[in-house]
Amino acid sequence: MSFAKTAIPFACAFALLAGCLGYSWTSDVPKSMRTVSVPAFENRTNYAEFGATATKHVLREFQREGTFKIRRTGDSALELQGVVSKVTLNGIDYDRGYDRRASEYRMRVTVECSLVDKVSNKVLFDNRKFVGETTFLSQRDVLTGQRNASDRVALDIARQVVDAVLGHYAEQPEPPKGE
């Protein structure tokens, strides 16, 4: 076997590993800040249960992501407060056979969240808006369609919220050595 045939795979492997040297599998969130509480989201809309649905999905997303441990409000370093501020439901396709009733709808939900550092009583972000949107089909049972769409929208918003919490710490400069 020639030197080139054995050297090329080793050179490629070395180049790949060298590119990974700066990568870390650890979180940017300080260990002292890895507990979070999520009180039930306030619902300021006419769509019942959306506050509870959004809260449930945010808690599940924090658990799935794995950086944070869920705690009660008094026992956590961080508290995420949420308000469901707007839900719109618009018909986007109509069925001519049923007196022009909508057969497809678009649901758009706006949630505003604040992240509070309970240790220092600082607001890390305040009333940041997160918007989720989906469509659903409905022949005659709009409520079932809304319920299914609510879960999809709440999951989308939950992912955005958890990403924003993690992103807050990724954006922070490292403290100087010795502090």
Image: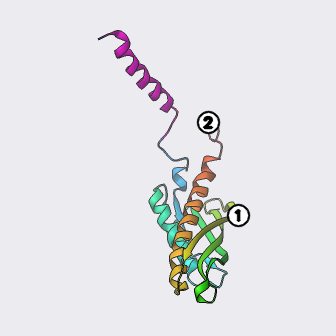
Seen as rendered, the residue at the extreme bottom is 99
- Report the magenta residues as a range: 2-24
Inspect this view and state whether residue 74 appears: no
Q: Residue at x 53, y 53 (%)?
A: 32
Q: Look at the image and say whether residue 12 sits in the magenta stretch.
A: yes
Inspect this view and state whether residue 134 appears: yes
Q: Which residue is mark 1?
A: 126
Q: Nearer the viewer, residue 95 or 70?
A: 95
Q: Quadrant of residue 9?
A: top left
Q: Look at the image and say whether residue 68 sits in the magenta stretch.
A: no
Three-letter amino acid code of the residue under disc 2:
Lys
Q: Nearer the viewer, residue 174 or 85?
A: 85
Task: Using the image, determine if residue 63 lies above or below residue 41.
Answer: above
Element class at badge 1:
strand
Q: Earlier in the sequence, mark 1 or mark 2?
A: 1
Circle 1 residues within 10 Å: few <14, some 14–19, many ≥20: few
Q: Nearer the viewer, mark 1 or mark 2?
A: 1
Q: How many marks?
A: 2
Quadrant in which the N terminus appears:
top left
Task: Using the image, determine if residue 168 lies above or below residue 107.
Answer: above
Residue 40: percent from the left, percent from the top? 56, 76
Alpha carbon separation for disc pair 1 and 2: 29 Å
Q: Which mark is residue 177?
A: 2
